[in-house]
Image: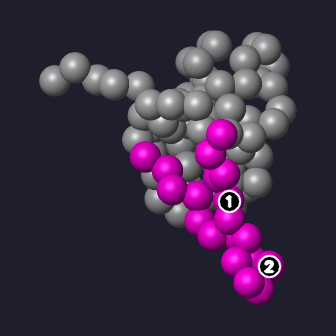
């Protein structure tokens, strides 16, 4: 199991490394019942898509990092 956030000597958390196409499992479920989200934009804000109902949400990175339970994997796109 990967450790997502590592606490440094001063008690602060390091940034979570996020990539486009990653699948994140969040602590709370979406009203549709799914707790898995695909990351579709990375920056100061994170845009995520619910894998249950395709709802798209834009939330601040800090709030997203607090709500992530684990990174499950990555969606591979055929080019």
Image quadrant containing the C terminus: top left
Q: Which residue is mark 2?
A: 11
User: Which of the 4 image quadrants contains residue 74?
Assistant: top left
Q: Is residue 56 at least partly visible in the picture?
A: no
Residue 8 belongs to magenta span = yes
Specify start and end residues of the magenta stretch as a single range.
1-19
Drawn side of residue 65 relative to residue 75, left or right = right
- Give the Cα separation between the discs numbered 2 and 1: 11 Å
**Prevailing SS of the magenta stretch:** loop
Could you say whether the residue bearing mark 1 is in a helix, strand or loop? Answer: loop
Neighbourhood count class around disc 1 (C-alpha, 10 Å): few under 14, some 14–19, many 20 upward: some
Horizontal and vertical percent position of residue 63? 73, 55
Q: Kindly indicate the quadrant of the structure image that contains residue 45.
A: bottom right
- Look at the image and tell me in which quarter the N terminus lies: top right
Disc assigned to residue 5: 1
Residue at image x 73%, y 36%?
A: 26
Residue 20 visible somewhere in the drawing: yes
Q: Is residue 13 above or below residue 22?
A: below
- The colour mode here is one colour
x and y, in percent, of residue 3 in the image: 66, 51
Q: Quick one: 21 or 58, which is closer to the camera?
A: 21
**Is 39 a magenta residue?**
no
Q: Residue furthest bottom?
A: 10
Q: Position of residue 28 (x, y in %)?
A: 83, 32
Q: Residues within 10 Å of mark 2 (few under 14, many from 20)?
A: few
What mark, if any, has residue 34 been given in the picture?
A: none
Label 2 or label 1, whichever comes before in sequence order = 1
Whether pointer 2 and pointer 1 mark residues with C-beta atoms closer than 8 Å, the reply is no
In-image side of 54 versus 28 (left or right) = left
* Residue depicted at x 60% and y 38%: 71
Pick out the residue farthest to the front. Answer: 1
In percent of the image, x 58 and y 31: which residue is there? Answer: 72
């Amino acid at each position: 199991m990967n450790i997502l956030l590592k606490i440094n000597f001063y008690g602060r958390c390091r940034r979570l490394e996020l990539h486009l196409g990653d699948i994140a499992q969040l602590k709370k479920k979406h009203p549709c019942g799914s707790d898995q989200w695909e990351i579709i934009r990375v920056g100061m804000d994170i845009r995520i898509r619910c894998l249950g109902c395709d709802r798209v949400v834009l939330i601040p990175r800090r709030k997203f990092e607090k709500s992530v339970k684990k990174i499950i994997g990555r969606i591979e796109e055929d080019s």
